[in-house]
Image (tube, rainbow, N blue to C red):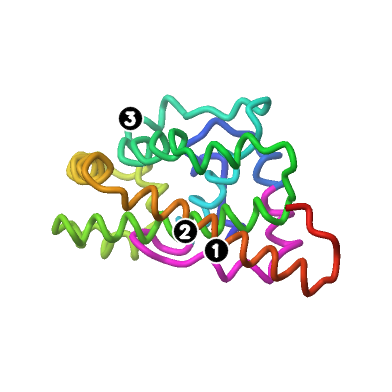
């Protein structure tokens, strides 16, 4: 499913070589790819989320920035990305000098699944589950390519979810807990793998 990632489906400014680099990791570490799961978005979109998280975890020197064009369509995603980039656990990871390739790959997968579930939970809590049902039948990150009517409906949904997400972010700590749990689980998987491989851990 990671092969469905394209430049046009990313909500960040990227080049094809970013996708190629991530796809090479997905091939190299395919035994971990089952960590990507459906939630509010389908499995293809879940992989796109994982890719975006992996990009955002790259050191600052890579200058990964938001796509101005995509902010017009995917407002809820940028609310979440901003929350992610302001999260203390996320920033600690991003700032690490010692960055084991596999660890950061696993983190991107675990966090994508955690985020996908968090979005679904927010939808259910705010009676927006119909959005998740709709997402099962099309690629969410292709929504900006729809007809005028489809885009209008999508933007209306975005507005509703933004309100729900902002409320959840401002009134609860569920997002922070999800990030921390995803990171903790990734470290556990990584350390178990390193232990089985009987190689010195870089963590």
- Residue 105 appears at what percent x and percent y? 65, 54
Instruction: Identify the residue under disc 2.
Output: 181
Q: Residues within 10 Å of mark 1 (few under 14, many from 20)?
A: some
CA distance separating discs 3 and 1: 34 Å
Q: Give 175 or 203, whichever is nearer the viewer.
A: 203
CA distance separating discs 2 and 1: 6 Å
Question: In the figure, residue 38 lies in which quadrant?
Answer: bottom left
Instruction: Identify the residue under disc 1.
Output: 185
Q: Residues within 10 Å of mark 3 (few under 14, many from 20)?
A: few
Q: Give 28 or 157, whichever is nearer the viewer.
A: 28
Instruction: Identify the residue under disc 3.
Output: 72
Secondary element under disc 2, as helix, strand or loop, is helix
Any part of residue 187 in sight = yes
CA distance separating discs 3 and 2: 31 Å
Secondary element under disc 3, as helix, strand or loop, is loop
**Front position among marks 3 and 1:** 1
Q: Are marks 2 and 1 in contact (CB under 8 Å)?
A: yes
For the N terminus, the quadrant is bottom right
Secondary element under disc 1, as helix, strand or loop, is helix
- Residue 103 appears at what percent x and percent y? 68, 55
Residue drawn at point x = 46 percent, y = 64 percent: 43
Q: Is residue 110 above or below residue 155?
A: below
């Amino acid at each position: 499913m990671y092969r469905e990632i394209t430049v046009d489906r990313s909500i960040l400014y990227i080049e094809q070589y970013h996708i190629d680099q991530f796809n090479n990791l997905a091939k190299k570490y395919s035994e971990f790819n089952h960590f990507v799961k459906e939630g509010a978005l389908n499995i293809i979109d879940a992989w796109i989320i994982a890719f975006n998280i992996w990009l955002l975890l790259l050191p600052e020197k890579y200058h990964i920035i938001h796509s101005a064009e995509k902010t017009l369509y995917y407002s809820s995603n940028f609310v979440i990305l901003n929350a992610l980039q302001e999260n203390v656990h996320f920033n600690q990871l991003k700032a690490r000098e010692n960055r084991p390739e596999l660890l950061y790959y696993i983190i991107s997968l675990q966090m994508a699944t955690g985020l996908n579930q968090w979005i679904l939970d927010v939808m259910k809590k705010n009676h927006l589950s119909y959005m998740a049902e709709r997402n099962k039948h099309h690629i969410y990150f292709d929504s900006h390519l729809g007809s005028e009517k489809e885009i209008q409906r999508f933007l209306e949904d975005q507005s509703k979810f933004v309100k729900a997400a902002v409320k959840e972010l401002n009134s609860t700590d569920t997002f922070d807990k999800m990030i921390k749990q995803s990171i903790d689980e990734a470290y556990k998987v990584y350390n178990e793998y390193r232990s089985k491989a009987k190689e010195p851990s870089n963590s």
